[in-house]
Each structure stands twice: as structure tokens, then as C-alpha cells.
Amino acid sequence: MVGNSCARDIAGAKKMKIETVHFGNEKCTIADHHISRFDELIKIIEAEEGYIKFNYKWADKVVLKEKDVKDLINYRQNLYKLKLIGKINDLVGYGNISQRQNGKQFIITGSKTGLIKKLDAKHYSLVKNCDFKKNSLTCEGKVVASSESLSHAIIYQLSPKTNAVIHVHNTKLWEKLLNKVPTTNKKATYGTIEMTNEIKRLFKRTKVKDEKIIAMAGHPDGGIVFGE
């Protein structure tokens, strides 16, 4: 819902649990997003359409410097060259990489950055906190955090020694590892509560803590590795 009246447009949409965009200079603290020009709406739509399945609060500001993402940039570039992270076409990208910042906070590649050949600091997002029950997170940066952020977050929570998580796509690897390493249920798709619950199940019932690898049955070609 896009509207310029907090009382008439935004409040009504919020009651119906519709995501809201407030347009104009009126103060409207209940809106999910604020824009002063209609072209700013494009960035919000691009972050939402077809990728992100969780709710989020995003502060669009510079919070990360090149030194903060130096290692992430180097490793991500190697993965991109191997086509473990990349794009299917000019609209669909895949794969992401993250690094623990401190405590439960972590830095992760932004949504749709698989489409970009070489990244810099503006292509990363800092995830501040997550609420798995509400399927939501709070992030800061010039991009919205990756659609797989909650999968990364639950691993950091369940594995305190883990400092990095990598999600890649590769058909041959996926077919070889499916059901031979800890594997999520095929009904659990990416970026959903079901996926985070499946990862929790694997931590309880398999040796994923030792093997540090997950095959995602409901996310074709997808897998996760993690470690210190």
C-alpha cells in the first residue's frame, strides 16, 4: 500500500497486515517504508519482488566500510569465479556469504547481489537482530539483507563457534550430497520459517555440528557450509 495519509492510507493497511509505503513529508512512524520521490519506490519493490520472504526493518544508510568486508569480498569473488555464487540470467541471482560481526549480528551479501560480478561495501548489509517466530529481521546498509539471512542467523545462533556461513548452488554437488549429508525437508523452501525450523531439526537430530554442511532438498541445487 502506497499512500500520503498516515491516518487514511497507512493505518488501515497496517490493520490488514499489508506492507506500507508512506509518501510525502508528513510524519508517519507506523509505516514500513518512507519515500519522498516515487522513483524511490523502485528500490523497495526490487528488494521484495520474487526474493525476500521475511518481514524486515531496513535502515538505508552507510554503516559498513571496505575494511569491514575485506575478507567477504575476497572469498565471494572466488566463489563467483567458480559459479557457486552468481546469476541464472539478468533477473535471477543465487548464493550468498556472511560473517559474524559480534554476538548475533552478522554481515551478509545483499538481496540480488548474485547478479553483480564484483562487490564492494555498499553491496553488504549488517543484520542487527532476528525474530524467528515472527519471520523478521532488522538490517542496515545500502541494500536489504539477502533472502537467505534467516538461514544464516539460525546457524549463528545454534553454533556459537561459527564465524562464517556460505550458501552456494551447484547441480552436481547437490545431487551427490542430497540425503547423504544432513538434508532439509523438500517442503521447506528458502527464506521461510519452515527452513529455519528444518535447520534447527538438523542440529538436534543429525551430526551437522560436526559435518558443517547442509543440503537443501526444497531449494534445488542449494547447499550451506559453515565454520569458524
Image (tube, rainbow, N blue to C red):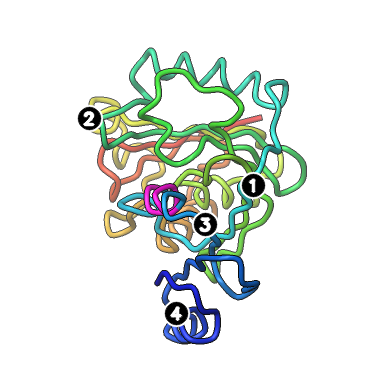
- The residue wearing badge 2 is 89
Front one among 114 and 195: 114
Q: Which residue is mark 3?
A: 200
| Residue found at x 38% / y 13% | 81
In the rendered structure, which segment of residues is drawn in magenta? 41-46
Q: Mark 2 or mark 4, which has the lower sequence index? A: 4
Q: CA distance from mark 1 to mark 3?
A: 26 Å
Q: CA distance from mark 3 to mark 4?
A: 28 Å
Instruction: Specify the amino acid type for callout 2.
Output: Asn
| Quadrant assignment for the N terminus | bottom left
Q: Earlier in the sequence, mark 2 or mark 1?
A: 2
> Of marks 3 and 4, which one's residue comes earlier in the chain?
4
Which residue: 65% across, 72% down? Answer: 27
Query: Which amino acid, by three-letter code, is at mark 3?
Result: Lys
Task: Read off the residue under disc 4.
Answer: 17
- The image quarter containing residue 67 is top right
Residue 11 location (% of width, % of height): 52, 84
Quadrant where the image shows the C terminus: top right
**Image: 168 above or below 31:** above
